[in-house]
Amino acid sequence: MAKFEKSFPFSNKWLDDRLAVNTLNRVLSTEYWIPKNINFLWAMGMVLAILFALLLVSGIFLLMYYKPDTNLAFDSVNYTIMTEVGYGWLWRHVHGVAASVVFLVIYIHMFTAIYYGSYKQGREIIWISGMLLFVAFSAEAFSGYMLPWGQMSYWAGMVITNLFSMGSLEFNGLVEWIRGDYVPGDAFLSRFFMLHVLLVPLAIIGIIVLHFGALRIPHVNNQDGDEIDFDVESKKYLAGETKEAKVIRFQWDFLSKDIFVLGVFMIFFFYLVFYHFDFALDPVNFDKADGLKTPAHIYPEWYFLWSYEILRPFSKDIGLLAFAFAQVIFMLLPFLDRSPNVAPASRRGLFRIWFWVLLVDMIVLSVMGKVPPMGIFNTIGLVSALTFIGLWVILPFITMFEKKLKD
Ligand code: HEM
């Protein structure tokens, strides 16, 4: 007891006695080892965390003036926030650009993990929680897209909620239950507003904690897929102490690298915010929602285009099944890849080809998702969608017979 009485309130010791802050700091930073042989792609996780923080802060400012009412929403965004509120335009551009760019960084982060095999051998939960983050960010982006109540908000809301009729099952009761009406209206806007500002962000914060927690024990992977012995009781493996040192400390050695990449990224980000924010705001959405005027061509934001194109070239029911397949299949990657090799794709035989075909195929699907589904575009879309499905079907077979690289 004496130990507690003597310590001075709010000093480091005072907090350590009560909350073990020093142990926490050791476990999470100063004795958290990161492999040396990683490149700038490993900073994308940090970039994502900062982008999420930017989305939260800019979102809170927008929330102060936004009106979740079908009669007021459009003007509250396009008139009040953009022209009347001091720097309202800046918060809107930061929010819009971050919402788009976060998906670019998520895709880079995901494909880095696929390329280096960072989803297996103890890292399965990192991968699965990452995919849950992808799903949660998709829900966050979609619900946010409804809020300005422009033409694309309304019609994308209509198209996506229609998917819940389950094709020829015509489960219309479910669609109306989700909308709270026969067509998107006030109830629809209020519930998507609640999802966007409360429920989904809470879920994202929870999953981020799980994602970070899952990283602590297996540690991050590295460019060679080396298993590094992090159980370094002796200080031999400390950065710089021996020539063979393979690890660096998270704080500040690794963090300083992360912060450098983050700085470069922020130059790119604010360049977009100030000079090219329009790429993140669809011109059609600057017309107020009108249930009697269907836009000539309805398409989602760029980051959903590949999965939209998997739905489009097929008949209604098969399209829905293909779409559902595309949503869940990435989650199963750690179990479909049957090879024990944790190594870059360049050293993994057929998997190398599989990786690049998948990447190019998803880019082609995204381009085809944007153009009208006519003539040759339809054929290319169909071939790419079939290629996507085929790639996942063959994955267990090509990886099952992969040559073992190391023990
Ligand atoms: C959007 C929110 C996300 C945040 C804030 C986030 C954050 C992080 C951080 C900080 C790291 C460690 C450093 C690094 O490798 O970059 C990491 C690693 C990882 N993340 Fe994410 N991540 C997110 C989304 C995802 C997604 C969508 C996936 C894909 C499924 C994913 C899969 C992984 C994997 C497999 C690793 C381990 C990498 C390795 O061991 O080398 N993450 N994440």
Image (cartoon, helix red, strand yellow):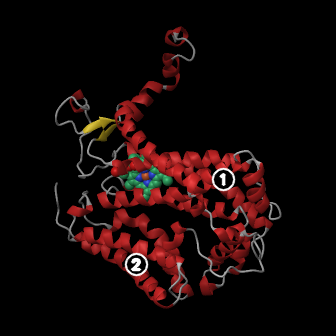
Q: To which quarter of the image does residue 98 belong?
A: bottom right
Q: Which is closer to the viewer, label 1 or label 2?
A: 1
Spot occupied by residue 272 in the image (x, y as percentages of width and height): 54, 54
Spot occupied by residue 30 in the image (x, y as percentages of width and height): 37, 30
- Look at the numbered disc 1 and give the secondary structure of its residue: helix
Q: State the residue at coordinates (48%, 47%).
A: 267
248 relative to 370 in the view: left or right: left
Disc 1: residue Cβ within 8 A of ligand 1's nearest atom: no
- Look at the numbered disc 2 and give the secondary structure of its residue: helix
180 relative to 132 in the view: left or right: right
Q: Residues within 10 Å of mark 2 (few under 14, many from 20)?
A: some
The one nearer the camera, 333 or 37, is 37
Badge 1 vs badge 2, beta-carbon distance below 8 Å:
no
Residue type pointed to by label 1: Arg
Spot occupied by residue 191 in the image (x, y as percentages of width and height): 73, 61
Q: State the residue at coordinates (51%, 77%).
A: 369
- Residue 92's tag is 1
Q: Residue furthest bottom?
A: 375
The residue where tag 2 is placed is: 389
Of callouts 1 and 2, which one flags the residue occurring earlier in the amino acid sequence?
Answer: 1
Q: State the residue at coordinates (41%, 56%).
A: 109
Spot occupied by residue 114 in the image (x, y as percentages of width and height): 34, 61
Q: CA distance from mark 1 to mark 2?
A: 38 Å
Residue type pointed to by label 2: Ile
